[in-house]
Image (cartoon, rainbow, N blue to C red):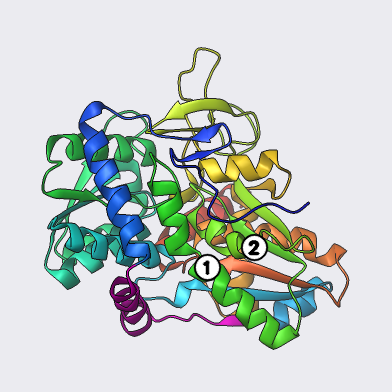
Amino acid sequence: MTVVAGPDLPDTQGHFGVYGGRFVPETLMHPLLELEAEYFKAQQDAEFQQQLDYYLREFCGRPTPLYLAERLTRELGGARVYLKREDLLHTGAHKINNAMGQILLARRMGKRRIIAETGAGQHGVATATVAAMFGFECVIYMGAVDCERQALNVYRMKMLGAEVVPVRAGQQTLKEAVNEAMRDWVTNVRGTHYILGTVYGAHPYPVMVRNFQRIIGDEARRQVLELEKRLPDLLIACVGGGSNAIGLFYPFLDDASVKMLGVEAGGEGILPGKHAARFQGGSLGVLQGTRSYLLQDEHGQVQLTHSVSAGLDYAAVGPEHAWLRDRQRVEYGYATDDQAVAAFMRLAKTEGIIPALESAHALAAAIERVPCMHPDQVVIVNLSGRGDKDVAQVAARVALETHRSG
């Protein structure tokens, strides 16, 4: 199936079919309209694009390699596995692509106070980094549970000069962090820009963040054509909100030969409150500014979620992903906590690369799919982040399992 991937999507109101849109308090309509106008001007501004290209190259470390994982490929015995090495970027994940684009927009709009939400901490670190670089005030909202499991990133944000606010409401994870960031934005809207970290929220965030992240797929496309003289057969990426996945997928959407797999967090299994796989039992609803698939009960109350990876532990998914699923252009599956941790350990031992637990979900799907493929086929896995932040958590989990089995 061929999907139109041009400027028609989203429409002028931010809709991807029935998904997307703008569902916010009246107070936020003006800043969203201002941001939309400024973003689309910046898209056409050669000077802005040159600045962004410069900082992405000289500060962030682009382009990132497309690396053939030779040992993993041999062990799996199927298609050739390439890793798109977003983990090698400054701050350790793809999040800096979007943070850099948005800080330049904030500077352009004269807004020198920056707020953000973060789950795994990588978006928070990226935001704190660019705020420090430009000398802007920075406040990061993070669920208290995530603060504990991502303590290293909390300290990194503080070192970079950001104020980190632990959110103790509700489940104390990413959804609550977004709520608090939005409350802050409503209160301080005149001089504050909200650097939202994923392809979610009210228009123009889903399209804007997608376009800042599409550099992943644009690079991967050029690189695989140079290395293999052909397009890949399969792209795999983890999906929380979905920015790293849409960044990889978007430039390939019109290539019918390229299949795509988004991998959600299966947690402890597909039971209420035990996972964050929105396409496994989720339904259409509105949450935090947009309409998409979310995990909710029959009364529309958002359900509890769980994932070993803080960055995937979220009740909703980006609206463009929901649209692509409806069109059957992208397949969406899931990996459990156990599968992700096993993939985390396997890549470390076979390739000398420690992936983020989020990225390990994509690797788990590759480990399952690749052996069933032909050796002439090519798979690209988006290694969206590095796993330094997750080592202590995985070590504690392994120690607990060893104690139980002993």
Q: Nearer the viewer, residue 54 or 197?
A: 54
- 1 or 2: tag closer to the N-terminus: 1
Residue position marked by numbered label 1 in the rendering: 355
The residue stretch that appears in magenta: 45-68
* Position of residue 333 in the picture relative to residue 116 (left or right): right
Indicate the position of residue 248 as horizontal and vertical percent values.
58, 64
Q: SS of the residue at dot 1?
A: loop
* Position of residue 191 in the picture relative to residue 296 (left or right): left
225 in the magenta segment: no
Indicate the position of residue 72 as horizontal and vertical percent values.
71, 76
- Disc 1 vs disc 2: Cβ atoms closer than 8 Å? yes
Is residue 40 positioned above or below 10 on the image? below
Amino acid at dot 1: Pro
* Position of residue 102 in the picture relative to residue 76 (left or right): left
Magenta-colored segment: predominant secondary structure: helix
Q: SS of the residue at dot 2?
A: helix
Indicate the position of residue 165 as horizontal and vertical percent values.
19, 45
Query: Can you tell which quarter of the image residue 89 is in?
Result: bottom left
Residue position marked by numbered label 2 in the rendering: 363
Query: Can you tell which quarter of the image residue 230 is in?
Result: bottom right
On residue 15, the disc is none
Q: Nearer the viewer, residue 3 or 323?
A: 3
62 in the magenta segment: yes
